[in-house]
Image: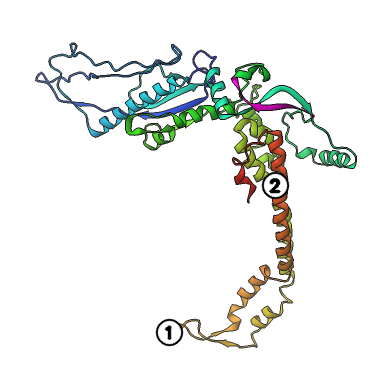
Amino acid sequence: MGSMSGLHFRDSNRKVDYVLVYHYRKRLTQHKSGAGSLGPIHRAASMAIVSNGETKKGCLNLQPDSGQHIPQEAQVIELDPLDTLEEEKRLQREEYECNLAAAGLEIEKDIENKSQGLNFVRIHATWQVLSREAELLKIKMPTKKMYEIKEEEGIVKKLSEIWCKLFEPLQPHVPQEDTKMKNLSYPFSREKIYLYNIRDKNTFFNNATRSRIVHEILKRTSTKTRNSMGISTLIANNVYDAAYPLHDGEYEYQNDDMNERKLLYREWARYGVFYKFQPIDLIRKYFGEKIGLYFAWLGLYTEFLIPSSVVGIIVFLYGCITIESDIPSKEMCDQHNTFTMCPLCDKFCDYWNLSSACSTARASHLFDNPATVFFSIFMALWATMFLEQWKRLQMRLSYFWDLTGLEEEVSFFSLS
């Protein structure tokens, strides 16, 4: 696909921001002619998008064939229902891709004309499209204005330094962002482009933002055929099989080419580093704010489960230690006390001895003993502390990630 790494078009310059995948099957049957030969397959009309980087957008009109080149011995082509459906999907795909090109996206398809198998449509968003959609979506981008973040002082600072040194082996080895200086962010505007810290237009919007912008265009682009609206409807109708952005290179090969995906794999997405803290800023940079907030919540929840699990184990061990001194269990398990109990049902049940429930009584004491009262009080306080700590962390991340105006987007994580 494209360049050797698969991340760019064939010109090795334009980045692939999104990929559409479809499986095209073509089966046409023909009658035999009088001479016993098969007539050639001829397409009556065709529609194609000008892609592969030759032009940025535009579609060819439907060109009906005059039929002058059809031999005499060719017979009428019979299309079974599968052929008709595949042809309809093909026309719908070409119309959808034409509309994407009209929206400003650049499209590249495979050079060879495959009659069947997997086909890939690569999409690239130009600077004009990215800047237009970023302004429309009111995406906050860093400006040239920077301000200093006030650091903690006194005993709080010393405790923070001790805490960082104590848990330094648990920190992931990823590049740390500067926490002393911060760029002032503002919703992107093309009229005030001089305010933004644009060093390179190709890297000003990160991969997560580029994928988000292209996905928004894919969602709102429609086709007249069957009144399909957006890529989700087309996938549901099996016009396309999948639509996804690409990862940032390989992560398994041992080479010097380090990328964010490989860094995340080494320091986060492996069982061997389960004890380390999450590189939450790198997760946010690679996957976006929503995924970053989800893993921030999951990480905090996992940390809070550690003390609750320790207390739960202590309560369980207390039940194991005191099981022999539990009076109700001793009375039920005493074979000399033959207490006869009434039947459990009216017709088919017989009388039974209370000592037969000895094992059930012992097992229930492990989880229902005087220490469980303390555990219930602890869990009530635990839930309150977790909720307040998450609110604090959420506000901190919203400040550093410039999400202060997106409360409705992250309300799911407030657990309210």
Q: Which mark is residue 390?
A: 2
Asked if the magenta segment contains residue 55, the reply would be no
Q: How many marks?
A: 2
Residue at x-position 80% and y-position 38%: 168
- Which region shows up in magenta? 180-190
- The amino acid pointed to by label 1 is Lys
Give the left or right position of residue 258, taking residue 95 as reference.
Answer: right
Give the left or right position of residue 72, taking residue 414 as reference.
Answer: left
| Residue 163, horizontal then vertical, whole percent | 83, 42
Q: Mark 1: which secondary structure?
A: loop
Q: What is the residue that sits farthest to the left in this orientation?
A: 34
Question: Could you tell which of marks 2 and 1 lies nearer the N-terminus?
Answer: 1
Q: Could you tell me what secondary structure mostly forms the magenta stretch?
A: strand
Instruction: Give the residue at mark 1.
Output: 347
Q: Residues within 10 Å of mark 1 (few under 14, many from 20)?
A: few
9 w.r.t. 172: above or below: above
- The amino acid pointed to by label 2 is Trp
